[in-house]
Image (cartoon, rainbow, N blue to C red):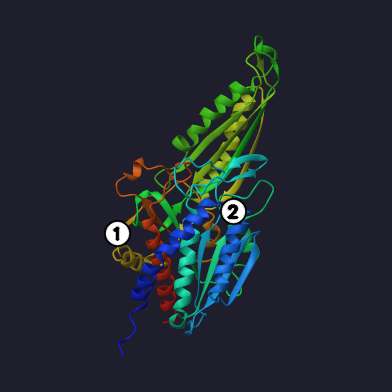
Amino acid sequence: MSPQPPLADRIAALTAALEPQVIAWRRDLHQHPELGNREFRTAAIVADHLRALGFDEVRTGVAHTGVVGLLKGGLPGGADGGVVALRADMDALPVTEEVDLPFASRARAVWNGEEVGVMHACGHDCHVAILMGVASILASLRADIPGCIKFLFQPAEEMPPEGEEGGAALMIKEGVLESPTPSAIFGLHVTSRQPAGVIGYRPGPTMASSDKLRITVQGKQTHGAAPWLGVDPIVTSAQIVLGLQTIVSRTLDLNREPAVVTIGAIKGGVRENIIPDSVEMRGTIRSFDEGMRDAIHERVTQLAEGIAAGSRATCKVCITKNYPVTRNDPVLTEQMVPTLTRVASTGPRPMGIEVVPKATGAEDFSFFQRLIPGLFFFVGVTPPEIEPSKAYSNHSPRFVVDERGLEVGVRALANLAVDYLASKAG
């Protein structure tokens, strides 16, 4: 009898056989997207799949709609039990799809009181399908796997509806990193910034922290023909917007890390000849260093309040911390890069691996990384005939996925899990 092939070879063969099913799952999920904390159909599909595979534990209703599955390997897992976690996010975005596909979304829903189109414009349908594929493969190999693997299917990565908790933070609060506790976690994100199948990673700070900014300027309403009789919050707000641009360009040491302060919405006034009482501005703050993050918050408040006072207005600044910096553990990353390199250089369509620049997008995978070492990486899904810089980006209504990248994601997560557990088993 010939010896069993190495697990990497068996994973590759199983992935090739499963690829059509992974694509079918992805297309079904794409056609039936669901918003954060409302992923009922998606969660049911995932839970049924894990139960059918004979998972040792399947927990549903975590953080509203999350699913957690535990797969116990058939080999000892080392002194600490050898537990690793794999995560996929399930939610779609309030975006109306503009891509002409036979499985395009026509879904509608209510988001924060407004009826919206719903689309998997960020690729979370791919993430769910990939992790379902990984579950199938590792379940079939469980006799030869040491330790345990936790599968986290997470709701509301794109933020829960206003007034609700959700996402990774709520999953952690409800105990997903306990009983048993993983010693590492891996996650991926498909991206239009790389050709299909290319794996991208970087050690250390990888994606930015994300904070909501709301500034309300209170003036005194008056006739537009007599501005001296009131206090103009529109002019004051304009000065604040311009002043905010100097925080990054003139007060931060950009040799350390980049940062962004953006105002994305300004609301005030009802007609052309009335100076309104107040103006509200909303924006976002992005950074890659927690000390710089706090410094930006302080300077935004000081600058806005100072400009308002100098204009005889008042100002209220509200900054809400959303997601921390997505920081790949340097030791874990160095340990697992050989696995990613092997995956990227093999398979039916080897495409390679690269160290990618920091991304000013944010990820709530960062909450898991605050508690255990984590590695978050990227898999390209842009067709090879399209230059990635010209491809429609994630979150665009015209975001398109080259599904040849899915099998790379399956092999990457499956190999990371078994290689990591093998290293713990010693």
> Looking at the picture, how far across and down is residue 425, in whole percent?
44, 81
Q: CA distance from mark 2 to mark 1?
A: 31 Å
Is residue 118 placed above or below 300 in the rendered structure?
below
Tag 2 residue: 156
- Residue type, label 2: Ala
Q: Dot 1 surroundings within 10 Å: few (below 14), some, or many (20 or more)? A: some
Judging depth in this view, the residue of 328 and 379 nearest the camera is 379
> Looking at the picture, how far across and down is residue 132, in whole percent?
49, 65
Q: Quadrant of residue 238?
A: top right
Is residue 341 placed above or below 111 in the rendered structure?
below
Q: Quadrant of residue 12?
A: bottom left
Q: Dot 2 surroundings within 10 Å: few (below 14), some, or many (20 or more)? A: many
- Residue type, label 1: Gly
The residue positioned farthest toward the top in the image shown = 225
Sequence-first disc among 2 and 1: 2
The secondary structure type at the circle numbered 1 is loop
Horizontal side, residue 420 vs residue 33: left or right:
left
Q: Quadrant of the N terminus?
A: bottom left
> Looking at the picture, how far across and down is residue 398, in whole percent?
44, 42
